[in-house]
Image (cartoon, grey):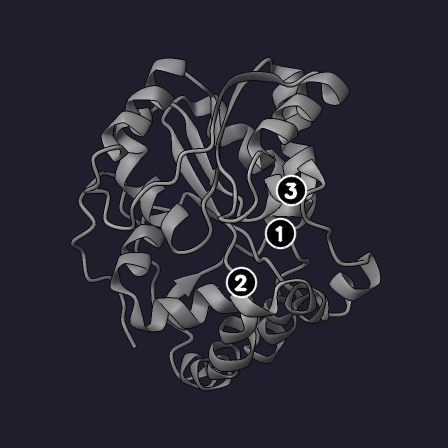
Amino acid sequence: MRFGRLWVDALAFDDAIAAVRQLVASGDGGAIFTPNVDHVVMADQHEGLRKAYRRASLSFADGMPLVWTSRLLGKRIPEKLSGSDMLLPIMQLAVENDWGVYLLGGMPGIPGAAEIASERLRSEFGVRIVGVDPAFVSMDGKSAGDAEVVARVKAAKPDLVFVALGAPKQEMWIARALDEIKPAVAIGCGASLDFLSGKLQRAPRWMSNTGFEWAYRLAQDPKRLWKRYLIRGPRFLGILWRTSRLLHAQRVRIVTGDTTSPGVSL
């Protein structure tokens, strides 16, 4: 279903896991994004993020606000499926199917998260890690090291690439790199590696399930997150109202590197 200029797949957990399994098994590559309220608000003004989302094979609702407001729009997203919630279940799929996993990124200011997360995934869960890269790429993909990052991922021949660069950078990187790293499936996972490494603490489950995870995150890192939650967040209400007027718009997906299609705009 639609939120502003982004689309979200209305899937329950078991169906989402089955869809991930099928996507990787297809051998065609693909992108999995986990949009939240901030993604919806950013996409309203950020053309690069909108284009990246048109390449998404799967798009899971990251946050209770999207679940709740889906009901106001006359449809129903069954449950929240954040990147952090999905990380370990997808890793279990990787173990069961002997998929190779590549970890890219880690949030700025949290050094070593990808390396610590990879060691935990190897030792505790038996995941076959084929590469760990803490490199930070540029927003437009034009810095000197960007091509080298793609080359390293491609050389590792992963089945899954977890990209933890934060939005909108991770979605834009995935959209640019997707054709080159096929048949890998790339997943934008935000702060998931930081949570897994213990470098960053997740909100208690009751806060996550009641829609107050944002308050916990804001208290942890107010300098970086205050604009996200206090300035951009309220704009979601206006986007929600506009969305309610266009419930029958059709979704546009781009299956190649051509992201010039205008899709449906508000």
What is the three-letter code of the residue carrying label 1?
Ser
| Residue at numbered disc 2 | 36
Q: Please identify the quarter of the rendering in which residue 158 is found.
A: top left
Is 143 situated left or right of 219 in this image?
left
Label 3: state its secondary structure: helix
The residue under the point 21% across, 50% down is: 259
The spot of residue 74 in percent (x, y) is: 57, 76
How many C-alpha atoms fall within 10 Å of the one at disc 1: few (<14), some, or many (≥20)? many
Disc number at residue 86? 3
What is the three-letter code of the residue carrying label 3?
Met
Label 2: state its secondary structure: loop
| Residue at numbered disc 1 | 82
Discs 1, 3 touching: Cβ within 8 Å: yes
Disc number at residue 187? none
Q: CA distance from mark 2 to mark 1?
A: 8 Å
Is 120 situated left or right of 1 in this image?
right
The residue under the point 65% across, 68% down is: 214
